[in-house]
């Protein structure tokens, strides 16, 4: 079942766009390395676009899980240019992840499950129903190409 996990709507378009524009991207997940390998089975071409990944439950550098900022700070530190956290943008679906990103000093776009309450969404920099609704230019990134 997990090997058939679908990508979130809009995820592949966004990842390919960021990669094509040479914007470094990393995966920071609370899942362990083995679980990530299972989940990406049918999406390897997309997951190869990430510069690196940090798997919180199996990475020895991650001392505390979300809502601690560890996982995001470690992910940022592993980029070659070591960006300032304020120049990092996190995409999250969970309230603990939003808090972790904010504690790291990063902006965060939340794409929550519909069961996540308004109260739990309020701290995110931006809340979207779908990654299809993301506008990169809202964060100073190159806009998606116009079709037509």
Image: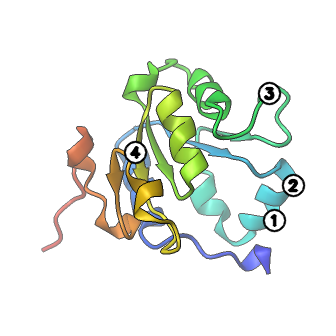
Assess disc 1: are there few (<14), some (14-19) or many (≥20) residues with their C-alpha within 10 Å of its C-alpha.
some
Reading the image, the residue beneath label 2 is 34
Screen quadrant of the C terminus: bottom left
Question: For mark 4, does the 10 Å Cα neighbourhood hold few (<14), some (14 to 19), or many (20 or more) residues?
Answer: some
Q: Nearer the viewer, mark 2 or mark 4?
A: 4
Residue nearer the viewer, 143 or 127:
127
Report helix, strand or loop for mark 2: helix
Query: Cα distance, mark 1 to mark 4?
Result: 32 Å
- What is the C-alpha distance between the residues marked 3 and 4? 24 Å
Q: Work out whether residue 78 or residue 94 is closer to the camera in this orientation and state it.
A: 94
* Residue annotated with mark 1: 38
Crowd band around label 3 with a 10 angstrom C-alpha radius: few (<14), some (14–19), many (20+): few
Mark drawn on residue 123: 4
Q: Is residue 37 depicted above or below 104 in this figure? A: below
Q: Secondary structure at mark 1?
A: helix
Provide residue 56's location: percent of width, then percent of height.
Answer: 76, 40
Q: Earlier in the sequence, mark 3 or mark 4?
A: 3
Q: Earlier in the sequence, mark 3 or mark 2?
A: 2
Spatial CA distance of label 3 from label 1 is 24 Å
- Asked whether the beta carbons under mark 3 and mark 4 sit within 8 Å of each other, the answer is no
Residue at the disc numbered 3 = 63
- Give the residue at x 52% y 70%: 113
Q: Is residue 104 left or right of residue 4?
A: left
Mark 2 Cα shell of 10 Å, populated few (<14), some (14-19), many (≥20): few
């Amino acid at each position: 079942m997990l090997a058939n996990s679908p990508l979130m709507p809009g995820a592949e378009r966004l990842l390919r766009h960021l990669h094509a524009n040479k914007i470094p991207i990393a995966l920071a997940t609370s899942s362990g390395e083995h679980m990530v390998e299972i989940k990406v089975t049918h999406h390897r071409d997309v997951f190869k676009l990430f510069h690196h990944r940090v798997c919180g439950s199996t990475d020895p550098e991650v001392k505390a899980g979300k809502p601690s900022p560890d996982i995001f700070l470690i992910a940022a530190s592993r980029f070659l240019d070591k960006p300032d956290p304020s120049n990092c943008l996190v995409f999250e679906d969970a309230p603990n992840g939003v808090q972790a990103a904010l504690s790291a000093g990063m902006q965060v776009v939340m794409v929550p499950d519909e069961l996540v309450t308004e109260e739990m969404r309020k701290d995110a920099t931006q809340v979207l129903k779908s990654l299809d609704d993301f506008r990169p230019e809202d964060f100073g990134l190159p806009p998606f190409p116009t079709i037509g």
